[in-house]
Image (cartoon, grey):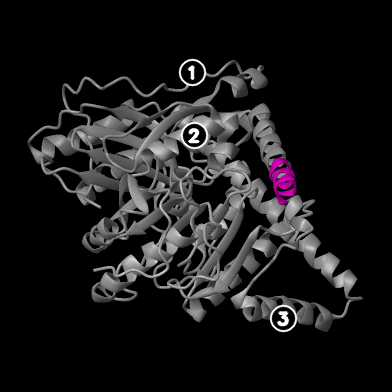
Amino acid sequence: MAEAGMAEGQGPAPAPAPAPAPAPAPASASDKEGAELAAVIGATVPTGFELTAAEEVQEKLGSASRISRDRGKIYFEVPARGLPQVHRLRSVDNLFVVVQEFKDYQFKENKEDALKDLEDLVKTLPWTDPLKVWELNNSLKKKKAKRKKHNLQSTASKEKLNNDGEEEGTDEQDACKREDCAQNAAGVEPVSEQDTEEPEGVASRNREEEEDNEQSDAKEELQEGSGSETKAGEGKTGEGDAKVLKFRVTCNRAGDKHSFTSNEAARDFGGAVQEHFQWKADMTNFDVEVLLNIHNNEVVVGIALTEESLHRRNITHFGPTTLRSTLAYGMLRLCDPQPTDIIVDPMCGTGAIPIEGATEWPSCYHIAGDNNPQAVKRAANNICSLLKKNENKESSTSLGIPLDIIQWDICNLPLRTGSVDIIVTDMPFGKRIGSKKKNWDLYPACLMEMGRICTPGTGRAVLLTQDKKCFAKALSRMGHIWRKGQTVWVNVGGLHAAVYLLKRTWERAEEKRSFW
């Protein structure tokens, strides 16, 4: 990531702010104020999947998105009461509310002048409504944490009662569950045949209950009005105490025509923020994180709404190359899963792709496997953690998730020919796992075996790899069974990788074939 900074510039005819929030209604009409308060939300997404994220926002929130010229970001407008739904988006990593955006900012060449403009910019920005959105977001996070704590306590009480107060019984039960996960590493089946008929309805019901709770919280906060909540502009806390808020400024800059560094921009902009709000600077234990994003002449000032990336939602047991859940979602969405589809990840690692798939597409059946027993064990533990998390949700009647995991050989899968609709997997890059040399034999063998199990004519595969040269050569040899449909260029841990969407041809895959 490059450095960042921003400045007001003497004549920077700022581009129109992306739909600033309308002026709030009088305090006596708090309901009306809540209905009118809107926010322009910025979201960071996996590079290359900006269109996928925009489609999800349109589908789930009904809002049109604008893709930033700075790759990996999208912007969209939502009413403040829609914040809970925004946090449930599966394709976004981090969220922030936009204070103001300048689409063609003219920076001064002299560093001192540019930094002076940066200081002056703070006083001119429309902070009021974005800070109200930040306050609301903070209150919702506190209520969600409180509800989660209550659910955990309720679950613990139930377990204690079920075991007649004997702690040993609970310990044995938990140990048994963990042991089951480990022992079934060659075939974890959290859903029985009877259960598989209903998981979508149950998952939807539980999700609806959670959404109702969060939506109710948002409505209550808006109705209470900003007068009774955190006065961020005055340095107050949610409890009404006159406690000074702590803040930090984070800058990100891309471009080589700026006279200042990100540290200099953060220092001067942060000093002006401190003077304007009388907040206290704190780089670690901060309440408010002000974002300063610059990409050439595009400048965005925002306030962070997430403390940690949303891609950490599913995985508790990490491996050497654990895939981000947001990237896994983008790959799955690329192949357009339909109800009853059988989706296979033959090299699942810690299970990021199948777990994301089973969570978001419960009407499909997901099968995952890996040849490494340690990877299978980690994936099984991640599944157990997800099941435990679902059990802890209030009023949960979860029957499990439609996902099995098994240890197998990728080149000799125990699946019938033509029985799989979709294959989604993260192939070995040949860096941390395997080697580039081994990939020259592995890739064509994988493509052949995947072609065998995939349904001719309608089957598709979404494959991620950084070893693009080897993959291209293997695919050219497998052209009789796979056709390349689309390529998405992505950044994976600083590596330039590609996601390939392949379509299965009608030709029958041979059991054995000379690849080279």
Viewport quadrant of the C terminus: bottom left
Return the residue at label 2.
57
Where residue 361 sits in the image (x, y, percent)?
60, 48
Amino acid carrying mark 1 in the image: Pro
Q: Categorize mark 2 by other alpha carbons within 10 Å: few (<14), some (14-19), many (20+).
A: many
Amino acid carrying mark 3 in the image: Ala
Q: Which residues are magenta?
A: 199-208
Looking at the image, residue 401 lies above or below residue 53: below
Q: Is residue 419 visible?
A: yes
> Which residue does the image show at 21% across and 19% down from the upper left?
13
> Which residue does the image show at 72% across and 75% down from the upper left?
177
Q: What's the CA distance linking mark 1 and mark 2?
A: 22 Å
Element class at badge 3: helix
Q: Is residue 132 visible?
A: no
Q: Categorize mark 3 by other alpha carbons within 10 Å: few (<14), some (14-19), many (20+).
A: few
Residue 22 - label: 1
Query: Disc 1 vs disc 2: which is toward the camera?
Result: 2
Outermost residue to the left: 110
Disc tally is 3
Residue 8 - label: none
Amino acid carrying mark 2 in the image: Val
Where residue 62 sits in the image (x, y, percent)?
53, 27
Nearest the viewer among 366 and 299 is 366
Secondary structure of the magenta portion, mostly?
helix
Residue 313 occupies which quadrant of the picture? bottom right
Where residue 440 sits in the image (x, y, percent)?
26, 70
| Disc on the earlier residue, 3 or 1 | 1
Return the residue at label 3.
175
Query: Disc 3 vs disc 1: which is toward the camera?
Result: 3
